[in-house]
Image (tube, rainbow, N blue to C red):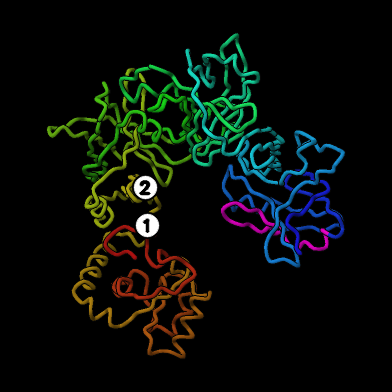
Amino acid sequence: MGRDIVEVENLSQKKMILTFCLSPDVFNEITSVFLVNKQSYEVPTVIRDQPLLRIDLTPLLTKIDDNINFLVYMQLNNQDRKVPVRLRSTLEAQPQYVANASDFQDQVALLTGTVNDNKTIGVCRLKNHSYLRQEVTDTLSNFSSEMNCVSNPSKGSSLFVEQFSVEQATLRLKIKNIENFNDVKIGFFKRSNRMFFLTEINQDHQTLVIDLSRFFVTVGKNAARYSIGILSSDGSTYHPIVYPYKYFKYKFNRYYHQIELQDIEHSKNDSQDEMIVPYFSEENELSLVVGKQSTVQSEASGLNTTIINVDIINKVVILTFTLANPQNLNLKLKAIRYQSRTKIAPEIFDVPVEINSESKAVAKLNLTKIELNHFYYDAFAIVEIDGYELQIEVKKSDARLRKRVQTRIKGHDYSDWTKRKVIYPIFIGNNFRLAMRDRDDAERPYDFLKYQIAFWSYRIFKNHFNRKKIWLTYEKESKRAEDNSFYFFQYMYQHHLNQNVYFVMNANAQNFKATKPYKSRVLKFMSIKHLIYLQAAELFVSSETPGHAFPWREKRGMIKK
């Protein structure tokens, strides 16, 4: 008979080291430790010092997401299956991380999270698979917080709110018949995983005051949606808070003051694009949404854009688009904002918007009057509604437009020859970006002429080149001949010359001379033959991506793999 559980005599956590105290017979049976959620992660570092078993959680921080509960399991040498780890119920001393001495039989679990922009893992215990209490230790700033949550409570009857207001990061609400609850436990029900997070409250007469800053620091800034409610005394039911008979003319009016996360304590280094917004759902339930500013504001307003055209003409990015307003809100379209995708102090360029004769909005960004310093810039429509500024992401577009922008470089590209920069529009999926990168040496005007010749040559004689069954090998940026790809090419040249294997190499590279004995099968980088064979190749053999066989790595232009 195998074990159904592993009982732990004692348990402690110091920074990222979790220590289990085990009985000798259990200690000798354990072969490995696992963290189990939807996936199973084996802990790579296990230190044995009988009767202590220590595991280092640090390597797991790069592999797992924030705010995920993990159960601790151990593999035994005489069993195929993993078994859960629990604290013994006979302990007399009460460890600091456990709330009640009667709960020592509970299963050991972990919770991942982010505190002060540093990823952490905290030890916790699971009470009857319902209550969760944890202490997170931030290894860099020694910031710690304690959180209570309940798993999968059922939804009970609604409670009516009589007054509600939002002041900075504080919610103030007066609930009808709140005196019927002996101990008011208020919190946030996360809809995605059905966890109910309890939070601290203050009471001002009959008004409940909720500080959202502590809640955010505890659960993190990941996009999520919560219902606000009051938990029953036994933790089995939560009662949603609703605003009865409240009429909202527009969906936009259901959303209240936005709380920008960089204004919340412990969030100074987080993205300025994240926010918390209290709102009332269609059932008038008091709720919270955490997410990107543009996503939340688009949801509230119903506004969305459609890109009609984008070109670069005479060093000016011309963006033509429409703005749909399904709620018929009284709004003013102020500008298009290009904002760098950086978390701290993003670069912002606002471009005035004109309405053309076809009632379409046009924004013209003069590239000679700005200095771009980052790779990607998002585009947003800046809209004002009743003195309130919204930021709506510009992203919806026609598939034919996306294909034209991706394949036709002429008219969609600006090269600053003095600063060696290239600026161009790009679509990643359906998302529009303005991109900037360093100009490659192989992007001179006559290189683009070779590019056109190679493209049409392959199109005309496609069947001929495809019958060659070409394999291309190359190394980093096609400037090296010293790694596995080159050795593979040498082997194929010496032993399988009947296979059309070619090595791509920049003629100006330092060790280009190493390819001289094989020059009949060496393609000079950016030669017409190289560009033709690049299109015809049926196989790429390299430790690098196919982008290293071409001057620019993003999938632009007519030649791309």
Comparing 223 with 155, the one in front is: 155
* Residue 416 seen from this side: no
Who comes first in sequence, dot 2 or dot 1?
2
Residue 155 in sight in this render: yes
Q: At x 37% / y 57%, what residue is drawn?
A: 554
Asked whether disc 2 touches disc 1, contact meaning CB atoms under 8 Å apart, the reply is yes
- Where residue 518 sits, quadrant-wise, is bottom left
Name the amino acid, label 2. Ala
Q: Residue, x 42% and y 32% (percent of image)?
A: 293
Name the secondary structure under disc 1: loop
Q: What's the amino acid at mark 1?
A: Glu
Numbered mark located on residue 435 in the image: 2
Q: Residues within 10 Å of mark 1 (few under 14, many from 20)?
A: few
Q: Position of residue 285 (x, y in %)?
A: 44, 25
Left-right relation of 473 to 560: right
Relative to the observer, which residue lies in front, 409 or 394?
394
314 is higher (above) or lower (below) than 331: below
Q: Which residues are magenta?
A: 26-44
According to the picture, the residue beneath numbered tag 1 turns out to be: 554
Q: Crowdedness of circle 2 by 10 Å Cα count: few (<14), some, many (20+)?
A: some
- Quadrant position of the C terminus in the picture: bottom left
